[in-house]
Each structure stands twice: as structure tokens, then as C-alpha cells.
Amino acid sequence: MIYDSKAMEMAAVLDTAQRICAAARTAPKAKGIDNLATLVLTGEDKDKIADELERLSGPLHYQFFLRDAGNVRQAQALVLMGVREGQRGLNEGCRHCHFENCADCAAHGGVCVYDPMDLGIAIGSAVASAADDRVDCRVLFSAGRAAMSLGVMGEDVRMVMAIPLSIAGKSPFFDRKPK
């Protein structure tokens, strides 16, 4: 059997995406509470995120969304990571959310500080895994915002970030120019 470079590169990207999801899952979580969600998109599903970035660029007045849409289109896969929000029950001893306790935070629609911290730690583990595989990547808030707009990960998953993955002669995420 003969495998061309495109087929092997796509297989490598998907293998890396699997490792990224595993690295994110096993990353430390505050109080051992795992609110993390991951999803991998390719092909038309990935390109729908790029389409939404282009659509959102106008109403949000974010021209860099157009540049990031191009990066998403160039990538072979897009890993999405988000969290389901919830309090950790540390109450008055914590107060990092700037509320009196967890119940006060929830009642006022606040966000437990540990959810975004856990997401950040998971992203760090994920991109380190991609680097170990020599697969180019970049963390994009913009593509995560587009995924939230489309509801790709479900309504309960918040603070979504995206990691496009690419194997190419030159990283599409380097020397990025505004559109």
C-alpha cells in the first residue's frame, strides 16, 4: 500500500488532536472537578467556524476575525476546548470571584475563577502536546467565540477557545497579517 504525504499528514494531525484532547483531560483541575469539554472539527464542520468568524467580524468590528478565519481554513483540524461553569464550594475562604461565597457568585451570574484557570492549564498541556508532535498550532479566542455563536459544543459549554492544527511547509500561524 502507498500513502501520499497529504494522507499521512492528515493522519498525523488527527493523531495529535487525540493526544491534545487526552492532555487537556489529564491536566490538573481545581478540587479535582472536571468541567472541561473538547471537540475536534475537520472539513466542512471546521470551515463553518471560519464562515462564522467572517460573519462576526462586521457586527463585532473585529477585523482580526477575518485573518483568523483564513488560519482556520488553512488548518487541517480545529480542536475546541471549553468549560461547563460551576462553583467549587470553597465559599468564604476563596472569594477570588469577588463575591461573598459560591452561592452569591451563582446568584449574581458570576463566574468561578477556577473554570478559566482550569481551561488555561488544559490549553497549556494541549499546545505542549502539539509541540511534542511538531504540529503547528495557535490558540484562538476568535474561533472559540465563533464556535460559541454556533452552539457547536452545546449551550452549557462556555469560554470556548480553539486550537487550529497544521502541518505545512511553513506555519500559517506565523507572520500573520491583518486582513
Image (cartoon, helix red, strand yellow):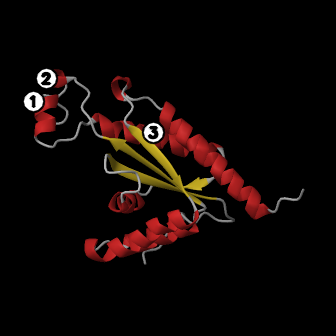
Q: In which quarter of the image is residue 129?
A: top right
Q: Distance between the residues labelled 3 and 2?
A: 26 Å
| Residue picked out by circle 1 | 100
Q: In terms of secondary structure, where does tag 1 sit?
A: loop
Q: How crowded is mark 1: few (under 14 residues within 10 Å), some or many (20 or more)?
A: some
Q: How crowded is mark 3: few (under 14 residues within 10 Å), some or many (20 or more)?
A: many
The N terminus, quarter of image:
bottom right
Q: Quadrant of residue 49?
A: bottom left
In the image, taking residue 75 as reference, residue 1 lies left or right, namely: right
Q: Is residue 117 above or below residue 169?
A: above
Residue 175 visible in the picture: no
| Residue picked out by circle 2 | 92
Q: In terms of secondary structure, where does tag 3 sit?
A: helix
| Residue picked out by circle 3 | 122
Q: Distance between the residues labelled 2 and 1?
A: 6 Å
Q: How crowded is mark 2: few (under 14 residues within 10 Å), some or many (20 or more)?
A: few
List x then y, in percent, for residue 111.
Answer: 22, 41
Residue at x 60%, y 41% (from the top left corner): 19
Q: Disc 2 marks which amino acid?
A: Glu
Q: In terms of secondary structure, where does tag 2 sit?
A: helix
Q: Disc 3 marks which amino acid?
A: Ala
